[in-house]
Image (cartoon, helix red, strand yellow):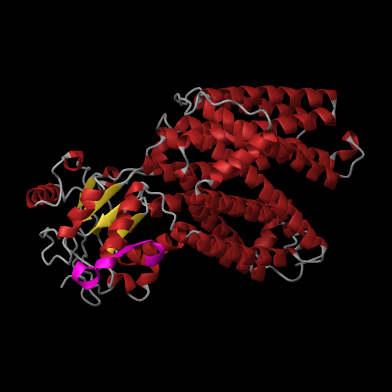
Amino acid sequence: MKSPLGLLASRRFGPLFITQFLGAFNDNLFKNALVVLLTFQAAQWTTLAPALLSNLAAGIFILPYFLFSASAGQLADKYDRARLTRLVKVLEILIMGVALAGFLAHSLTILMGALFLLGCHSTLFGPVKYALLPQHLHPDELVGGNALVEAGTFVAILLGTLGGGLLAAAPQGPVWISGGGMLVALLGYLGSRGIPSAPAPEPTLRINPNPFTETWRNIGFARQNRPVYLAILGISWFWLYGALFLAQFPAYARGVLGGEEGCVTLLLAAFTVGIGLGSMLCEKLSGGIVEIGLVPLGSIGLSLFGLDLAWASPSALPGPEAQPLTVLLAQPGMLRILADLVLIGLFGGLFIVPLYAMMQSRSAEAQRARVIAANNILNALFMVVGALGAASLLSAGLSIPALFGVAALMNAAVALYIYRLVPEFLLRFIVWGLVHTFYRLRVEGRENLPDTGAAVLVCNHVSYVDALVITAACRRPIRFVMDHRIARWPLLSYVFRHGRAIPIAPAREDAELQKTAFDQVAQALAEGELVAIFPEGGLSRDGQLAPFQPGVLKSRERSPVPPIPMGPGKHVSTPPGGRGEGRLEAGFTTPHPACHRQPDCTGKARSGADFTRRCSLVQNTLSVYSDRCLKTLQICG
């Protein structure tokens, strides 16, 4: 598997990454520089209190997300997205010109107007950026692309925040701020020139100028696909959770840890490093697919290390005066606090990257930018609600460490609620954990599985864990047709039931159950799902394809969709304490449309033999190897 860093050298991704990185950097450079300048030189600009100015600036910047996200989504679905990106970068250059005018005129009103326009710039670019990723990247690159974008965004936020503070403190600060912002905007425009054309998916779309009705309509698009909508809610919750922690860093550094200004930077850097590590680790663990099984793992880490941060926080200041960074690092428990922040960021990366990739890959192409716009609206709403909730709790006397603990417990509750509504998250986590505990999987030929539409996976059966391994190797949910006795096995029955497995029985045992199974298979295929069958009716002793049972041909008569033959090979068990090499071989091949188009491909012996022959000829395209087995796993009889 190629490293996602290779995408940075690709024209399909590199220019977009540079453009979005510089955009995020410039947003935070100007916003933080303005806040620092108004905080320390408030008397020169206004009679308002510095604390009020800081919150006013944050509100002005986020307001466009509520007002214009819906319009931004429409534009990104109607016009070429690469061209829109360049126009947005031109707007950014003009905004920096407005900021320069505000500094020259010494006008707080103009500067706040420039900040509002910069929020508009980010609002317009958000749907374009995330809609471009699935349009330019291959399916097996989508997780890696999102990982780089999320890691790059947080690094840009950190660097922009630091750079803004330094420029605001420099002599002739306003000149440096406006000049630096203009330079970054120009570099961003140059980067956008390299983005390849991205034709509009719905060029005939009529723009609705009413932001309120269009906002509700966009949320409606998102709600049409339940997993996508809940992924958006998960993303929004993460931004609430992360923003709540980040907003407390200045007060936490001074009032709880007793540190100077440099302590805030250290806390932000630890969190940012964690996000970067988690995003890249997510790509590694995903194995080239959108592995939503990592989302529960991320939520567990977010809660555990959020709670540990609350417990590790000191109950008393180390001294009456603010401590320099070197003294603070020598304090007991400080390294534990930094480790907690890194791990919160790391598990945050595991949580957020699959959700973004899932939102992009499963939303309809013609509505994708508007679904992303709905995501941005809900992100902003959740962050505002989180800020108001945190302010209320702190005003009621709750300490900052206790606030972290409350947020961690709420995160666990929200996660359980989402996984209860969409069991697919938890099921993928269980399957991913079970399979990767015993095997190190290498998958080849996954591209032969269709990204959308119905298909039948025809698999020979070599072990009782075939269904779990196939699920882990596939990027789409699969409905397995399995023996009704296996479907009721303890523990695994939970996975099979919530994975919507289709139990079946021989007609001599339960004719009604068999008929129901065939009805469910037909319905699943009619709805565009993947269905997997083991047509031999039992385990293979030698890994070779045995004669098919007649039932498989009955299902073929009702639903003539492309069969995708898959041939698992042998599992080799490892002796106790040994380092034997477990091996699993399988083969997904390209669908055979000729087979399902033949008018005589029915239950007759000749057609069944032809179908079997086609399956057996192509059953070794994909191989999944188990390089390691950690303990005895006797699979073959």
In magenta stretch: residue 499? yes
| Identity of the residue drawn at 71% across and 69% down | 314
Residue 218 % position (x, y): 59, 39
Q: Which residue lies furthest to the front in this view?
A: 512
| Identity of the residue drawn at 51% across and 23% down | 204
Q: In this view, does 205 lie above or below 268?
A: above
Q: Image quadrant of residue 318?
A: bottom right
Residue 435 % position (x, y): 33, 64
| Identity of the residue drawn at 13% across and 48% down | 611
Residue 511 % position (x, y): 24, 67
Of residues 390 and 360, which is closer to you in this image? 360
Can residue 191 be seen here? The reply is no
In magenta stretch: residue 196? no
Magenta part of the chain: 497-512
Of residues 261 and 361, which is closer to you in this image? 361
Can residue 636 be seen here? The reply is yes
Asked whether, in this view, residue 521 is left or right of residue 257, the answer is left
Asked whether, in this view, residue 529 is left or right of residue 514, the answer is right
Q: Is residue 321 above or below residue 380?
A: below
